[in-house]
Image: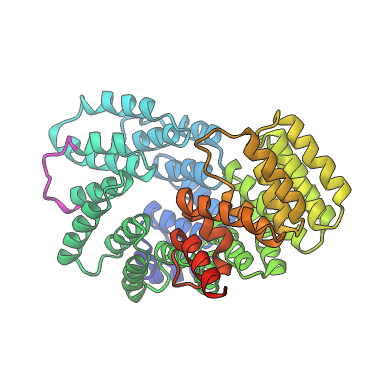
Amino acid sequence: MSENYFQSGEFKEILRRFEESERGEASEFFDYDQLMDIAEYYNMLGNVSYAKQIIEKAIHIFPDSIYPQVFKARMALVCDNDPALARDIVSNISDTTDLEYIYIVAEIMLYEQQYDKADCYLGELYTEMDEETALDFVIDVATLFADYEDSFHAEKWLMCSPETDAEDYQDIKGRIETLKGNYEEAEKIFNELLDQDPYSTDYWNHLASAQLRAGKFGDSIQSCEFTLAINPDDADAVLLRANALLQIAYYEQAAKAFAKYAQLRPQEETGELYQAVALSNLNCFEEAVTHYQRAEKLCHKSLDTLHDIYHDLTFCLSRLKRMDEALAYTDKLEKLAKDRDYDIAILRGHIYLENNDAAKSRDCFLEAIASSEGDPEVFFRIAISSIDNGYVEYAYQCLQVMFALVPDDWKEGYAYLALCCKELNKKDEYLTALQTACEINPEEAKTALDYLFPDSVRPEDYYEYTIHQHQENT
């Protein structure tokens, strides 16, 4: 169901009558389509429990209809992260030939990343369909695979459709090209679709998505603005715009945009999480912690996302000198079992160092070195932590050890060695490290040393600029 429908007068009238009926002010019959639209609306607003109540009402009133059951199963997937529950709900559906039943069974497989299994299941059914049903089926299946970002199977199914000029075909083709990284082709497709239907928020959002992935952040923001002019509460456009603003370091505007997304999608952690990221970049750590912890409470679908939340919280809490809380989140990270032992040890060492406990920090760093069996990457990360916390001499020593261990084609760390030498007044070593950094890793040179140079100087030219300045001053 498109969000635009929820803004329509037709839906608002149905919702008004439903709410009057619920309050006992009127008595009215609603069909299952209307009840499911209302349930989806409340789910979108974050009132999941009420949405589930409405679905149960629909199941009670229409026990022979599979659509409320399918909706209930999809909520088990999306809201509860419970594919087992979804399968259990689906097992109660008797009509296994209905397309909605077929799609939800396939979606459960896709949710569990069983892409080939879903493809085989759908393929067996496809061979038995009449021509008219098959035409719609291949588009629906291609859309389903695209929704789960499986471009391979989405394209395979789309190629089964002969209606290559149809709008829905071109829409899915554009999404597939975006997933494949063919952004120019995707932009071309969506611009052509918009020529036919300039008020389609879906097309504007798909165009914005392709532009965002292509790194055309300004263009993506502009495409989102067209959507928001049509529907100011289009959540997809709000999120795309927020992500683009974050990418171009417009952190204050990004924080506001993510806050709006959190209002539109209060049941998701995304708005709270990235609002916290933007606030962290503004050094608003107290506010960031509040939003990270809200995201933590909402996050129940992705261990990867929960890992990122815990990781970011450790840094924010450490910056706020709330060391015990920061260390408690390293314990949570450890329980997720997604980090290596030395990753956790380095993180704890950083927290101790930032909170002026150099002895415990050193113990953690030594533990990390031992656990990693002297991995040079570990020495590099310890050096970065030491630089961040003002322990430049220790960082210099770590980098010296690292460079004694690395292969000849190693490219990391020279800019940070130059930074240490600059701080420690090791002039000759500074110039040597700076020259190497500019030659083999100008990106790192910019990250570590840009504050030393005018914005007009390219990182590739930092060394030449330094030599020139030295010659002018002698």
Q: Residue at x 48, y 40 (%)?
A: 73
Camera-side residue: 337 or 25? Answer: 337
Magenta stretch: helix, strand or loop mostly: loop
Camera-side residue: 203 or 95? Answer: 203
The answer to if 166 sits in the magenta stretch is yes
Question: Is 231 displayed left or right of 296 in the figure?
Answer: left
Question: Is 128 displayed left or right of 231 in the figure?
Answer: left
Q: Position of residue 201 (x, y in %)?
A: 30, 65
| Quadrant of the snapshot with the N terminus | bottom left
Question: Is 237 displayed left or right of 275 in the figure?
Answer: left
Q: Is residue 452 visible?
A: yes
- The picture quadrant where one finds residue 107 is top left
> Compared to 422, does 61 lie above or below?
above
Q: Is residue 259 visible?
A: no
Q: Position of residue 386 (x, y in %)?
A: 73, 53
Total marks drawn?
A: 0
Q: Residue at x 82, y 60 (%)?
A: 322
> Compared to 459, does 335 lie above or below?
above
The range drawn in magenta is 159-167
Camera-side residue: 351 or 1? Answer: 351
Q: Position of residue 358 (x, y in %)?
A: 85, 51
Camera-side residue: 365 or 97? Answer: 365
Q: Residue at x 40, y 52 (%)?
A: 32
> Compared to 150, does 226 lie above or below?
below
Q: Position of residue 433 (x, y in %)?
A: 58, 52
The answer to if 438 sits in the magenta stretch is no
Question: Is 2 displayed left or right of 127 in the figure?
Answer: right
